[in-house]
């Protein structure tokens, strides 16, 4: 029986001290919200979710990375690999989804969730804050090898989202470049980079990497 795509958890978090970020704080510790969460177009470096904090605004948040989604199925695979429980939000994702191929999502496709409309803009690139938070040796290399990075989204229409909301995929672009392919292009398969040049919806931070700039979360 096919599972309908839905949001199993909407996750937000405050700023917490960390030694793994240049700014000394991180908002990666996301926890499930108990009710509906307002989604808005953020300012520069801000989160699109009410009650959610992003700390290193050089590389996080803003209009094209307002929301981060990760599949519960991928969390379950990582839980099996790592031999530990991984709760919703533990990868710093705002939306933990189920029944949705996040890695296979086309950059630029739109998702209707609750009363909000979101657009896929880029894959998540792992960094030292993420590695430090999980405490797994060689995490950046391990995460990169699997190439199931989750997806950043921008807010097209503001609204509310909550756990249990269905995800309806709309308006898939014809270029066919997926989140997974764009991730490989930006990390391990640089020969794919020319494919990204045709992707108008690509997030600003990802587009900068086309010119060789790197990020350090």
Image (cartoon, rainbow, N blue to C red):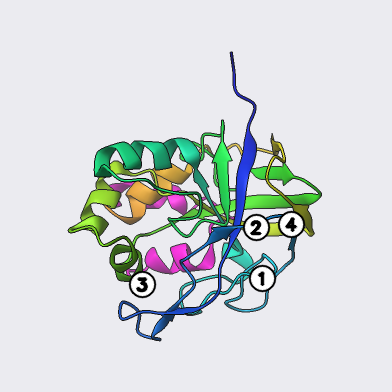
Counting every numbered tag in the picture gives 4
Residue density around tag 3, few if under 14, some if 14–19, many if 20 or more, within 10 Å:
some
**In the image, 210: left or right of 15?**
left
| Residue 17 numbered tag | none
Viewer-nearest of discs 4 and 2 = 2
Q: Determine contact: label 4, label 1, CB under 8 Å.
A: no
Helix, strand, or loop for circle 3? loop
Q: The N terminus appears in which quarter of the rendering? A: top right
**In the image, 114: left or right of 210?**
right
Helix, strand, or loop for circle 2? loop
Q: How far across and down, in percent of the image, does residue 44 sit?
A: 61, 79
Specify the segment rendered in magenta: 189-217
The CA distance from mark 3 to mark 2 is 29 Å
The CA distance from mark 4 to mark 1 is 19 Å
Could you tell which of marks 4 and 2 lies nearer the N-terminus? 2
Q: Determine contact: label 4, label 2, CB under 8 Å.
A: no
Could you tell which of marks 4 and 1 lies nearer the N-terminus? 1
Viewer-nearest of discs 2 and 1 = 2
Viewer-nearest of discs 3 and 2 = 2
The residue identified by callout 1 is 51
Q: How far across and down, in percent of the image, does residue 92 sit?
A: 47, 60
Q: Identify the residue at image location x=18%, y=58%.
A: 138
Helix, strand, or loop for circle 4? strand
The residue identified by callout 3 is 215
Q: Is residue 52 above or below residue 107?
A: below
Q: Is residue 135 visible?
A: yes
The residue identified by callout 2 is 33
Does the stretch in magenta take in 58?
Answer: no
The residue identified by callout 4 is 156
Q: Determine contact: label 3, label 2, CB under 8 Å.
A: no
């Amino acid at each position: 029986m096919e599972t309908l795509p839905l949001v199993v958890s909407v996750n937000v978090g405050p700023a917490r001290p960390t030694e793994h970020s240049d700014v000394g704080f991180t908002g990666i510790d996301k926890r499930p919200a108990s009710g509906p969460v307002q989604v808005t177009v953020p300012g520069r470096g801000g989160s699109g979710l009410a009650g959610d904090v992003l700390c290193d605004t050089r590389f996080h948040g803003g209009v094209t990375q307002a929301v981060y989604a990760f599949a519960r199925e991928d969390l379950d695979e990582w839980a099996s690999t790592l031999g530990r429980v991984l709760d919703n939000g533990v990868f710093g994702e705002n939306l933990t989804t189920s029944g949705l191929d996040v890695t296979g999502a086309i950059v630029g496709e739109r998702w209707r969730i609750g009363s909000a409309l979101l657009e896929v803009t880029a894959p998540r690139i792992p960094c030292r804050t993420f590695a430090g938070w999980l405490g797994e040796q060689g995490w950046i290399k391990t995460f990169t090898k699997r190439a199931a990075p989750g997806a950043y989204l921008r807010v097209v229409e503001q609204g509310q989202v909550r756990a249990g909301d269905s995800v309806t995929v709309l308006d898939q672009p014809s270029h066919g470049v997926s989140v997974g392919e764009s991730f490989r292009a930006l990390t391990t398969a640089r020969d794919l980079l020319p494919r990204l040049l045709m992707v108008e919806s690509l997030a600003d931070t990802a587009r900068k990497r086309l010119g060789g700039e790197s990020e350090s979360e």
